[in-house]
Image: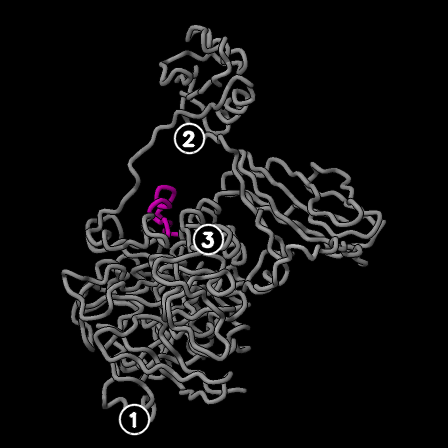
Amino acid sequence: MKMLATVVLSAFAAVPAFGQSREYQAPRLQAPDATDQIIVRWRTDAKATLAASPAQRASKLSTSSGLTIQHKRRSTANTDVYKLDHAMNSVELQAVLDQLNANPEVEFAVADQRRQIQLRPSDPLFENQWYFGSTEISATRTDQAWDITTGSANTVVAVLDTGVRPDHPDLANKLLPGYDFLSDARIGNDGDGRDDDPSDPGDWVDSMDRATALFSGCTATGSSWHGTRVSSLIAAASNEGVGMAGAGWDTMILPVRVLGKCGGPDSDIIDGMRWAAGLPVDGVPENPHPANIINLSLGGNGACNAAYQSAINEITAQGTVVIASVGNEGINPGTPANCSNVIGVGGIRQAGTKIGFSNLGTGTDISAPGGNCVNLGPPFSDAAPCVYAVQVAFDTGRTVPEGPSYTDRVSRPNFGTSFSAPLVAGAAALMHAKNPQLTPSQFQTLLQESATPFPTSSASTTRICRVPTTFVQPEECICTTVTCGAGMLNTFGAVQAALKPFGIVQSTATIEPNVAVSISGSTSFAAPNQSVASYQWSVVNVTGATPAIADAAAESTTLQVNGNSRFTLRLRVTDDAGTIDDTDFAMVTSTPPEPQTPPPSSPIGRSSGGGGSFDWWLLFLGLLPLALPGPRRRKVTNGSAGRSHRRRRREHFAE
C-alpha cells in the first residue's frame, strides 16, 4: 500500500485531488483474452482426485463450474489441460476461474492463453535504443508497452524547442502545423519574427555574434538541431525499416519554435506554451491542434516566477500535461521544471544512479535515462563506443541545414536531461492513447506510482545523493525519492496503470465527532470501454475511536465517529473486468486523539541514535559537450550570493 505523508505530497508538483494516496491491484489469477482452454493443477494432497481417471477429474470440474469441460491432456502428475465447451472473454472466464480456484483440491486454475512474439520495431537503429528495452536497470520497458499500444494519431505532443527539420525522414510525416514564436529576428536567425514556419534554420553562435551586445555572453558553438533530436525520441516514424524508433509510433508532434541563437526569452516561451495548449495569444492565429502534452527540454536557474506559474495553471486547467527537464548543472532544478503542476524529469544512468550532471532535489518528480558514457571520455572509437548514448535524429550541418542523419556512439554521442523529459512525454503519449480522460495530475500520479524503485546500491559508487544547498553535486550518486523523484520511469507500468480504474474520494479531511459527514466516490472512473462495477469503503490505521460507515458498499454514503480519532478512509473500486484500485484518504477529528505514549526504553542494549530578482537566462538542458570545449561551470557560493547571471546562455552541443 502506497501511503504518502502530507509533507511528501506537498513536495510533488501535482498531486491527486484531496491528497489521496492510491494503490492498484489486480486479481492474482485474472484471465486475459478469449480462450477455450484452461490449465488446472491439483493439490498433491488431493489423493482421491489424482487417483481418478482424467474423465472423472473433468467431470468434477464440470460440476463445480456448471460447464461441460473435457480433459485434453496431462502436463505433469498433478497438472491437466482442459477444454471448455466454448471460447470465453476475460470477464466470463474470470468468473469460471474464480469458481475453480475456490475448490480446496485445486492449487490453481488459469487461462491457457495464446502468446505472440513481442512487438519489436524494424528500425535498424533500434538496437542502440537500450532505454526503450527491459534489460538495463533504468530501461523504461517501453518495448513491453508496445504490446499494449503504439500510440494514437489523436495524441498530440507539443515540442517547444528550436523547431524541427521537416525534411528528416523519421519526422516528415509526424508533424502537425506548428508556429515560430521567436519575436526577435536576430535570435530567430531566419530573417523575420513570428510566423507559421517552425522549421529549424540552425542556432549556431560564432565570433561575429559574440562581438554584439545581444550575444556577448554566449558560447560559440555549432547548430544543435535540438528540437529535432527531442521530437525523434517522442514520435520518430517507427517499424518502417528506416532509422530509429520513437516512443509513440503513431503519436503526432506539434513543433513550436521558442529557441534560437543562445536560447530564447521567457515571453516567447510562455506565449508558445499557451498557444500549444489551445489558449489565445494576441496576434497569433488559433492553434487548430491543441496539444495533450507539452515537452520543455529547456530551462534556467531561479525560482518559478508568476508569469510561468500563471500560464502553467491555465494550461493544466485545459487538460494539457506539462513535462520539463530539470537541468544539467548538479544543482536544484530551475524554471520551468520547479513550477507547480509541471512534471520535472531528472536524468539517470543505465544502472539507475543519477547522472553526474543532472540537477536534483525539489522539482524532480521522476527520473528517466539521460544517456551516459561508461568510458572515461572522448575520443570514443569503434572498439570503445559510448555504450549508453541516447539515439536521436538530427541534421549534419555545422551551421545551416545540410542533410538528415542520426547521432552515433563514436563521434557524436548524445546525452543530457533534455532527453530524459521526452522519454516521459512519450510514455504519457502512450497512456493518453489508452485513456485520454486522465487529467494532468492523474497522469503524474500514475507515472509516479508505476515508477520502478531506485536501486539502493551501485557497483560504481557508494555516494548517496543529497539535495544541493550551498554546494554542487555534479557526480554520479545513488538516488533517493527526495533527490530524484518517485522512481525510474516504467512506461509499461504506466500504460498498464492507465487501463485500470481510478478511485477518487470526495470528503473533508477534518471532521467533528458525533457528526455524520458525507463521503463519495462518485467521480471515480474506469478506463475506456470499462465501467466501475462496485465500491467498497473501509477504515484502516485507526488511532482513537473507530469510525462507522453507514453503507460500506454504496457509491456515496456517510461516516461518523463518536470520539476523537485519526484514521485512513479507504475506497476500493472494482471495474467490470475485475481490476481493483485502492485509494486512501487521511482523516482526523477537529480535536485529534492523544498521541500514544511509547513504553519507556530499557537502558540495557540501547543503541545510539543516528541516522532577490535578476534577469532570467535560458539554458538548453541537453547535449553535454564532448567534441567541443566543455561549458564553464558556474561558481556556486552561499545561496545566490556571488553568482554571475547573464541574460541568456545555453550549453555547448556535441557535434
x%, y% of residue 400? Answer: 20, 76
x%, y% of residue 133? Answer: 32, 49
Which portion, as a residue range, is magenta? 140-154
Identify the residue at the far left of this view.
382
Residue carrying label 3: 453
Q: Amino acid at mark 2?
A: Asp
Q: Is residue 591 visible?
A: yes
From what the image shows, is residue 62 above or below residue 518? above
Left or right: residue 48 versus residue 211 is right
Between residue 57 and residue 520, name the one nearer to us: 57
Q: Amino acid at mark 1?
A: Thr
Between residue 17 and residue 173, name the one nearer to us: 17
- Residues at marks 3 and 2, CA–CA distance in whole angstroms: 30 Å
The residue lying at 44 percent from left, 20 percent from top is: 40
Between residue 269 and residue 285, name the one nearer to us: 269
Q: Amino acid at mark 3?
A: Pro
Label 1 vs 3, first from the N-terminus: 1
Left or right: residue 577 versus residue 618 is right
The label nearer to you, 1 versus 3, is: 3
User: Label for residue 33?
Assistant: 2
Local packing at callout 3 (Cα closer than 10 Å; few below 14, some 14-19, many 20+) is some
Local packing at callout 1 (Cα closer than 10 Å; few below 14, some 14-19, many 20+) is few
Helix, strand or loop under label 1: loop
Identify the residue at the far front of this view.
604
Residue carrying label 1: 212
Helix, strand or loop under label 3: loop
